[in-house]
Each structure stands twice: as C-alpha cells, then as structure tokens.
Amino acid sequence: MTEHTKTDGLSEAAPEPQVLERARPRNERMAAGKIECNACPVLCQISPGKAGACDRYANHAGVLVRLDPVLLLRRTLESGDGAVVPFIAPDTHEPVAPADGDASGGLLRGDEVFVTGVGASTTYPDYKPAPFIVQSEHDGVDMITVVTEGIFSYCSFKLKIDTDRWLGPEQANVRCRGEVVGHVTTAEYGSQMLSLGGVHHLTGGSKKEGRITCDMMAALGNKEAVELSIDGGSQLVVQAGQAPIVNGVREQRMRVGCGSATIGIFAKQLWGRADEVVVVDDHITGVLTEHQAGRCLDMPASGLKIRGRKSTPGRYFQVANPGTGWGGTDLVDPLSIIEGWDPDVARPGLRLLMTSTTGEHAAWYVLDDALVPREQPMPPEVAQVVARIGENCEPSLTSVLFLGGAGGSLRAGVTENPVLLTRMIKRLLVNVTCGGAPAYVWPGGGITMMSDVLRMPDRSFGTVPTPAIVAPIEFTMRADDYRALGGHMDHVRTLQQVLASGAWHHDGAPTARRWGQHPDPNPWPIGAPPMLG
C-alpha cells in the first residue's frame, strides 16, 4: 500500500523522516533525484530541495515530506471547560520540547489534546486510510478521531455582509481581478449575501477563472481581505470578521430593522416629540401616524402623501430604487418620496422627522404656511431618539462560511464502506469538525457541511493546482462505533504515539477572546454534540 502522503512534517524535535513508499512514476524518463508527488492529480516531479506547485509537499534529501506540520489543539483548566487554546509554550512561543523519558513532553498531564486536519495531509487517491486515525479517551470512553485534509472541488463560501447598501442586482456576477467568481444571492434581514466559488468556477471555465477563483477562496478562508466587484453594482473589500468596505467607504452599522420595525420599536419614544415620522428603507418604509403603532398611541393623521406601493397601513414598498443612499435606497433628498400633503389634514407648524433604519441619515422639517417642509435644526430630544436607533444597530461585519461536500473518496479514508459513515453522522453518532471548529451538517444525502472560518485556526485552507481547495476535516466517534462502521482499525494510533512523532505546530487556534465574535469558545470536539440539520 502506498503511504506517501502520510507525512507528519519536519521539526527540530521530530525524528529523521523515513523514506516513504511511493507509487511508480508515470513518467519513466523523470530526471534522477526527482520525486513524483501523487498527493493530487497534478503529479508534480519535485527536484531535491524544492517544493511542489502547491507549496505543501517537498523533496527533502530524496524523501517526500509535508512542509506544514500538524496543528494540535488542547483544552486546559485555565481557559475554562471546553475552551480551545493554542498549543504553545508561554515563555518561548515555540513548540514544547519533549521531556526526558516522555515523548509527549508532558502534554497529556492534565490537558486534553485534539489532532486537527490542518497540516495532516491528504490521502489522494483515497484508497488509503486517513493520515491520522487517533485513539483518545473522553470521560472514560474510548474515542476515535479520523483526521485528514480534504481536496474540495465541490465547495464554496457564503458571505453575509451586514449592510443596507445595495451591492448589486440579485444573480449579478461577482468578479475578482476581472474573472467571474460567484454571484449575488437573496438578501437577508439587514444583510446582503454573496455565493462565491464553487465547482463551475473552479473547473468549468477557463484556466484563469479557475486559478483566480481558487486563490480568492483560499484568501477568504484564511481570513484575508479580498477585493471584489459586482456587475452593475458596487466595489467591495471583504474580510472575515471585519466591516465591509463598499465603494471605498467602511460600513459602520447594520439596520436595527426595516422601516416598519423601526417605527414599531421607537414609536413610544417619538410620540409627543414629532407629529410625523418617516423611516426610509429599501424594503418597507414606515409612516408613523398610519402605522398600527401610531394608531395605538392615538396619533392624529398628518395628511402626508408618500410615493410607493402601499402594503398595509403605514407600510410602503418601492418608495425608491435600491442604492447606497438613505436606508439602502438611491435617495439623496428624502423629500423626493413625498408627493404632497392633504390640505384638509396637514397644518402649518407640523413637525416631521425623516430618518434611515440605522440613524446614519436623519433630518428635521417643519411645515410652513404653504405646507412645504422646511429643514430646521433637530431638537435635542429628537436627536436623542435618532441616536438610540443607531445605538441599537449592531456593528457591520462580514461573515465567511465555508461550505463543502465530503464525497465518497474522502470517506474511503475513514471506512471501507463509506455509506455507513454518512448514516452514522445522520444518526448523531459522529461529530464533524473543521480544524476543531464546529461544523453544521446539512440534512439530506451526503455529507454537506458548513463552518464559520472565524472559528477555524489560522491558515486552515490550502490549494492544489487542479485547481481545488484543501481544507481540514475530522470525524470523531466512539471506538465501538468506528469498529462497527468498518473503520481502518489496523491504522489506529494512540494519542501518545501521535505526539511522539514530534511534528506539530501550535499557532492560530482562535478563541472567543481573540476574535470577539462568539460568546463562548469552540466546544471541545471530542464528545461535543454534533451540529446536524
């Protein structure tokens, strides 16, 4: 059996790498000293001292080695129950050297260790067992974690961009460096959504499109900033956990609600301070005196006539076109949506507040004798409510979620009967993680999983030139269940044996305190309940 991709990397603490058995080179004329790497379909012929096209495998004195060592996570009492922290020596910030007579360097004394797929290597063409099949113990129960890096062509990133700004028409192409890499999808409450990557862009177009798509996906997964443009829409800079930059302007807030919801939330605070309030919104623009909230407060009608398609009392659709102005519309002058005033109802001196759903745009008007609204300085008590609207808007962020399908060949690294793994995942007997981070498994057939890249360790994603994305994946289950699904029991190694290899690294494990995105650290992957649709 060819085990050429089961390399643990190199480190000063690691033993000298053994010569790995390799398949016969397809090119019998390959120059002396070169090694053919079949970790992916490219089959690089690597010269001594050089790396392959993916920069992940290299020829080290005639030995094929994985350049990035494996990432381990540990759980410590100091970080709280279930917290995942970097595996790092606090004084030198270097890997802990093994102690005399203790191959693990004391790392198991009071700590729990989890071997991630980051740096674990792949098992292409996947007739081989996964690189690491690790036995450990949790609450007195023997557990097995199957660890690998998957080569994903069927994968994408879903971006949630917290902004009311119009980014582009639904289904519009999204481009990176001029190449189409995705599309705009349906907007969600307070956020615009993009779908980027996918197999058709990776392999279904030109070589340039596939290469740029792959580079863009790896950058997004590794929490780097990426510049995008949308056909017929905006220019963007997006980065996981950071505010999006739309047309050169960094976003600050996502809306507290649509115009109708904003009216409902703040009606009582505005009552008595304004005679009419219009909250401009691309979705539903709210008019306070017509709205049910205004009626419940017995507010008299103002006589305002507003443009748009009336949905229900005080709620209007399509008051303006989408854009980057007031409330996600193309409005620069909010008065342009007012058709007029009913002279039998409106009166001189009527006080009108117009605001956006984030409070970033707001203006105060008073009707003159001709019932024409004249802008005046906003009273402090009204400005206080507008500030409250802004206070209730959450910070604008970009969320990046990795979505990938674990196909039959990857599952073959877990078991000789791959369908049993899928069935056990659906029965909640197997926990799926990505670099130790929780993964949501979609319902239905196959193993389609999704994970927030902010929860994943730094530099979790790589690429191969096919092109495709390389991402970590781990399957954790009871040892008895692994045996029952036909797992590769002959290739199980204890955690102590894995640590004794000495080839691992420590940096990049995110915590809640580091990223500030989650109230709790990642749940401990071993024994944590699966996230299943």
Image (cartoon, rainbow, N blue to C red):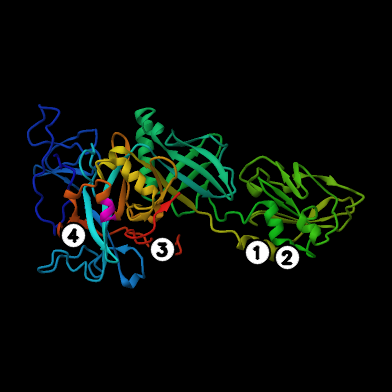
What is the magenta segment's predominant secondary structure?
helix
Q: In this view, does 112 lie above or below 1?
A: below
Few, some or many C-alpha atoms within 10 Å of disc 1 (few <14, some 14-19, many ≥20)?
some
- Determine contact: label 2, label 1, CB under 8 Å: yes
Left or right, 212 with respect to 44, comes to right
Secondary element type, mark 1? helix
Which residues make up the magenta segment? 478-482
Kindly identify the amino acid type of the residue bearing the numbered disc 4: Leu
Say which of 333 and 275 sits in front.
275
For image coordinates 36% across by 60% down, the residue present is: 528
- Residue extending farthest to the right is 344
Q: Earlier in the sequence, mark 4 or mark 2?
A: 2
The Cα atoms of the two marked residues, 3 and 4, are separated by 26 Å
The Cα–Cα distance between marks 4 and 1, rounded to whole angstroms, is 54 Å
Q: Which mark is residue 388?
A: 1
Mark 1 vs mark 3: give the one in front.
3
**What amino acid is labelled 3 in the image?**
Ala
Mark 2 or mark 1, which has the lower sequence index? 2
Q: Name the residue under label 3.
A: 512
Q: Mark 2 points at which residue?
A: 269
Q: Do the residues labelled 4 and 2 touch (CB within 8 Å)?
A: no
In the image: residue 363, left or right of residue 453: right
Mark nearest the camera among 3 and 4 is: 4
The answer to whether residue 119 of the structure is visible from this angle is no
Q: Given this view, does label 4 or label 1 mark the residue nearer the observer?
A: 4
Indicate the secondary structure of the residue bearing disc 4.
helix
In the depicted view, which residue is nearer to us: 379 or 449?
Answer: 449
| Mark 4, residue position | 499
Picture quarter with the N terminus: top left
Label 3 near label 1: C-beta < 8 Å? no
Where on the picture, by quarter, is residue 505?
bottom left
